[in-house]
Image (spheres, grey):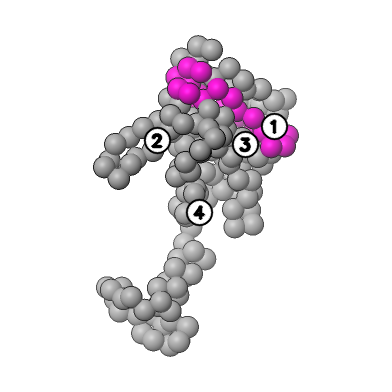
């Protein structure tokens, strides 16, 4: 019976207070392969979506002002964007990623969810590393992105919600 055992057949305590690397690795591997929902992957947090993954947050510090969203996670496509807006520092201060001037999306992206980039006042451009395959732009996706001047609505778009570009003045 491998339940509750590590690769070296060491029992796992019920409160998981351990520093043994083989136990920790076993638990992490089990969580990564058997639990659906939010998963962290390097600089992004992903949530399971119907046809792949949705990026729901990131911790990337774009030194050059460009944030490039990956097109794949765990061998499946990243199909949606949600919640890239806020960053919280160690003191709990919330910012709206003031350093991001451009976001590069992969061709796998099909939808921009509610308030995906909302409030990114310095965001000037959204470009694509391949084709623009976006189908849906939901409410508030670019709300109050006051510097946004360069975003092409592709031929695959069939839905743009009211308020998707609310407050975009450039």
**Does residue 143 appear anywhere in the picture?**
no
The answer to whether mark 4 and mark 3 are in CB contact below 8 A is: no
The tag on residue 132 is 1
Looking at marks 1 and 3 on the same chain, the residue that comes earlier in the sequence is marked by 3
- Residue 42: which numbered mark, if any? 4
The answer to whether the residue labelled 2 contacts the one labelled 4, judged by CB atoms less than 8 Å apart, is no
- Does the magenta-highlighted stretch encompass residue 58? no
Q: How many marks?
A: 4
Q: Position of residue 80 (x, y in %)?
A: 57, 40
Distance between the alpha carbons at the discs numbered 2 and 4:
17 Å
Q: Estimate how packed mark 1 is, as few (under 14), some (14 to 19) or many (20 or more) residues with alpha carbons within 10 Å.
A: many
Helix, strand or loop: magenta stretch: loop
Q: Quadrant of residue 109?
A: top right
Residue 61 in picture, x, y percent from top left: 47, 41
Q: Is residue 16 shown above or below 119?
A: below
Mark nearer the N terminus (3 vs 2): 2
In terms of sequence position, does the residue under pointer 2 or pointer 4 come before the other?
4
Disc assigned to residue 86: 2
CB under 8 Å between callouts 1 and 4?
A: no
Separation of marks 4 and 3 at Cα, in angstroms: 17 Å
Q: Secondary structure at mark 3?
A: strand
Establish if 155 lies above or below 4. above
Q: Label 3 near label 1: C-beta < 8 Å?
A: yes
Task: Kindly identify which residue carries mark 3.
Answer: 105
Residue 126 place in picture, x, y as percent: 60, 28
The magenta-colored residue range is: 121-147
Q: Position of residue 60 (x, y in %)?
A: 48, 43
87 to the left or right of 78: left
Sooner in the amino-acid sequence: mark 4 or mark 3: 4
Question: In the rendered view of the protein, which quadrant contains the N terminus?
Answer: bottom left
> Which one is in front in this view, the residue at disc 1 or the one at disc 3?
3
Callout 2: SS: loop
């Amino acid at each position: 019976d491998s339940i509750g055992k590590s690769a070296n057949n060491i029992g796992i305590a019920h409160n998981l207070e351990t520093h043994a690397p083989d136990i920790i690795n076993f638990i992490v591997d089990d969580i990564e392969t058997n639990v659906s929902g939010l998963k962290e992957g390097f600089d992004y947090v992903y949530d399971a979506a119907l046809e792949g993954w949705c990026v729901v947050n990131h911790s990337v510090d774009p030194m050059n002002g460009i944030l490039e969203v990956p097109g794949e996670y765990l061998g499946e496509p990243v199909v949606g964007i949600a919640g890239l807006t806020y960053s919280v520092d160690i003191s709990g201060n919330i910012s709206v990623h003031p350093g991001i001037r451009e976001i590069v999306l992969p061709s796998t992206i099909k939808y921009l969810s509610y308030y995906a980039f909302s409030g990114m006042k310095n965001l000037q451009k959204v470009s694509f590393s391949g084709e623009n395959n976006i189908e849906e732009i939901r409410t508030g996706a670019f709300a109050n992105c006051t510097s946004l001047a360069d975003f092409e609505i592709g031929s695959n778009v069939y839905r743009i919600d009211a308020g998707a570009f609310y407050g975009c003045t450039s």
